[in-house]
Amino acid sequence: MAQIGHLQESLSKLNFASLLEFCSKTARPDRALMAKLVDAFDMMTAQETAFLGVLKNIVDIHEQATQDLAAENEAMGKPDEKKNESVEMEKKPSEKEGEKAEEGDENDEEMIRETLKELEQVSLQALAAAELNEKLVESLQRHKKSVTEASKLLMIFEYVNFIYERTSILELRKNKTDELKSAASAAMAEVKKAKQEVSANRAEIVKKQREAEELRKAALKAGIQVGAEEEKHNEEITAALAAVVNDVERIPPIPVVEEPVAPVAEPEDPLEVRRRQIRENIRKERERSVIYLHKVR
């Protein structure tokens, strides 16, 4: 009886209810496992009902036997009121009562044997249900462990994917920066070369203009008028200087990501204006790069 009570306690309805609730709340509930739990719960309920019926029969038999024993004791304690009857009349009822008592005892023993047999079957079924319950609990624990491990693997995969995307973005930004720096370096080299050419040409033109002015003054001093060819030559020199300056101003802007070049101390130099334009283009390119990176993230 103590073993059966322990089995009933281990197979309580609260245990099955908690298991079913856990299965239903998982991310991917195991339908087959839940069906097995429900079947085990129904089987346990049926066994519990049968066991209670057997116990009720045992209690009824015990009460009936107690009542019969009390009635016999009471009958044996009463005085014999029929002592004057014949011996044959006393003998026949006593024999009939003995036969009835023997039949009743045999029936009681048979009922007790059947009850014990049913109780044994119920106990075996309860043991089988307990083993099934243990197997289901172990399966549920394995399922829970697998779900937990799958969740951890998913988190690790998402983290690795995030790191990979982050590294790709940084690598793309680095490549873009290197390309812009290379383009900016080439542009600055061209600008520097053009500036040197302009400076050299300007110095040469100024020198020629100075020589032409000295020749003109010398010619005027000597009374010689400047001819049309010399004036044309001076105009060509001035036009060449203007063309060189215009060519420098027509250099297209190239966006770069680089520290701005230190300005040359020349007031309102066309190159300084060009540098300001390049810096403005660099600032705009940086803003576009920041917006693009935010969109990628």
Image: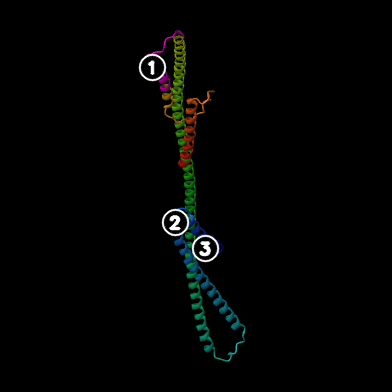
Question: Which mark lies nearer to you, 3 or 1?
Answer: 1
Q: Which residue is at 49% across, 33% downward?
A: 280
Where residue 79 sits, quadrant-wise, is bottom right
Question: Which mark lies nearer to you, 1 or 2?
Answer: 1
Q: Mark 1 and mark 3 in contact (Cβ < 8 Å)?
A: no
Q: Which callout, 3 or 2, points at the residue further toward the start of the chain?
A: 3
The vertical placement of 23 against 251, above or below, is below
At which x and y percent is residue 93?
A: 52, 86
Residue positioned most to the left: 229
Residue 209 makes an appearance in the image: yes
Q: Which residues are magenta?
A: 221-243
| Other residues around mark 1 within 10 Å, as few (<14) / some (14–19) / many (≥20) | few
Residue 131 makes an appearance in the image: no
What amino acid is at disc 2? Leu
Where residue 183 sits, quadrant-wise, is top left
At which x and y percent is residue 6?
A: 55, 61
Determine the secondary structure under disc 2. Answer: helix
At which x and y percent is residue 202?
A: 46, 18
Of 61 and 178, the residue lying toward us: 178
Where residue 74 sits, quadrant-wise, is bottom right
Check residue 13 in the rendering and tell me which mark sits there, or answer none: 3
At which x and y percent is residue 174?
A: 47, 31
What amino acid is at disc 3? Lys
